[in-house]
Image (tube, grey):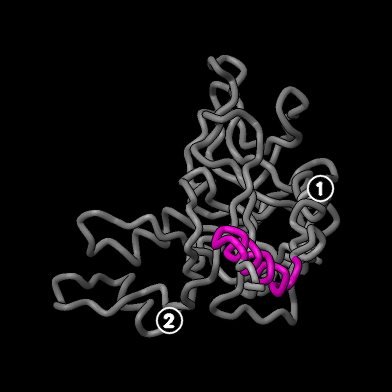
Amino acid sequence: MQASLPHPAVTCCALILAFVGSLPSVQAHEWPLADTLARVKPAVVGVGTHQPTRRPPSRLLGTGFVIGDGSTVVTNAHVVDIDLAQDQYEELVVFSGTGNQGRVVGADVLRVDAEHDLALLKIGERLPAMALATAHEVREGDVYAFTGFPIGAVLGLYPVTHRGMVSSITPLAIPARSSVQLDARKIRRLQNPVSVYQLDGTAYPGNSGSPLYDPATGQVVGILNQVYVKATKEDVLSQPSGISYAVPVRYLTRLLEREEIR
């Protein structure tokens, strides 16, 4: 008796099932970002100004995150480099909460590190805080998450989370092809190069000051920076790319040590 052969479609399905079955299973707990977000989001705040006579009264300029005892906020220096209309009662504030539950909290600039585009703000109440990575080594190829308010408050007070791979650890300043492209700031940076993390994730100007953190632990490894770093890295390009950058957390740690903040 002649043996019957299986139908080609059945054979193909069997091979696919066998291949899929040989792959390692991916469980939800192997990418714990969803659980980490529940802890991270309350510590991420908007940074901007509030003026009662203005319509709308609140203006969101960037993102920040709370550290330490809950009364210190980290953001980019360029976010708070603004002239307040104090005669019209405009003040620097942070926006905490989400959506209709958002609150306005007054803030004061505590210290600015212009070289690394970092700023510390002091607020009058305590909010949930994020932990800073200390002995954590960031490597090219590692994937991290960042949470903030892209494009200001256009999307409302709803923090948005992206993820990005560290595609390169690169110096902030790049050599110029001619002396015409050099200025005093670039010369200083070439003499004392500052390394930044180049990410393949997409960030927007409103993400400036967003925490870059480990999706498993929530520990901050860097601070997103779109405007200041881009101007230094890519001003030689006529059409800047969509590359995102982050300032390593070690520069923030040094700033905190100078302020004796824990």
- Secondary element type, mark 2: loop
Residue topped by disc 1: 38
Three-letter amino acid code at the position of disc 2: Pro
Q: Which mark is residue 193?
A: 2
- Asked if one can make out residue 242 in the rendered structure from this viewpoint, the answer is yes
Which x, y percent locates residue 4? 63, 67
Dominant secondary structure (helix, strand or loop) of the stretch shown in magenta: helix
Tell me the residue at 27%/61% (across/down): 235
Marks 1 and 2, how far apart at CA:
36 Å
Is 129 colored magenta in this rendering?
A: no
The quarter of the image holding the N terminus is: bottom right
Residue 121, x across and y down, in percent: 68, 50
Within-10-Å neighbours for mark 2: few <14, some 14–19, many 20+:
some
Any mark on residue 165, and which? Answer: none
Nearer-N-terminus badge (1/2) = 1
State yes or no: discs 1 and 2 in contact (Cβ < 8 Å). Answer: no
Q: Amino acid at mark 1?
A: Ala
Q: Is residue 89 left or right of residue 114?
A: right
Along the line of sight, which residue is nearer the eye, 156 or 13? 13
Counting the numbered discs, the total is: 2
Please state, as top left, top right, bottom left or bottom right, where the C terminus lies in the image: bottom right
Q: Position of residue 190 (x, y in %)?
A: 35, 81
Which contiguous range is marked in magenta?
Answer: 6-25
Check if residue 8 falls in the magenta segment.
Answer: yes
Residue 224, compared with residue 205, is above or below; it is below
* Badge 1 density bin: few <14, some 14–19, many ≥20, Cα 10 Å: few
Residue 173, x across and y down, in percent:
36, 74
Q: Nearer the viewer, mark 1 or mark 2?
A: 1
**Viewer-closest of 92 and 76:** 76
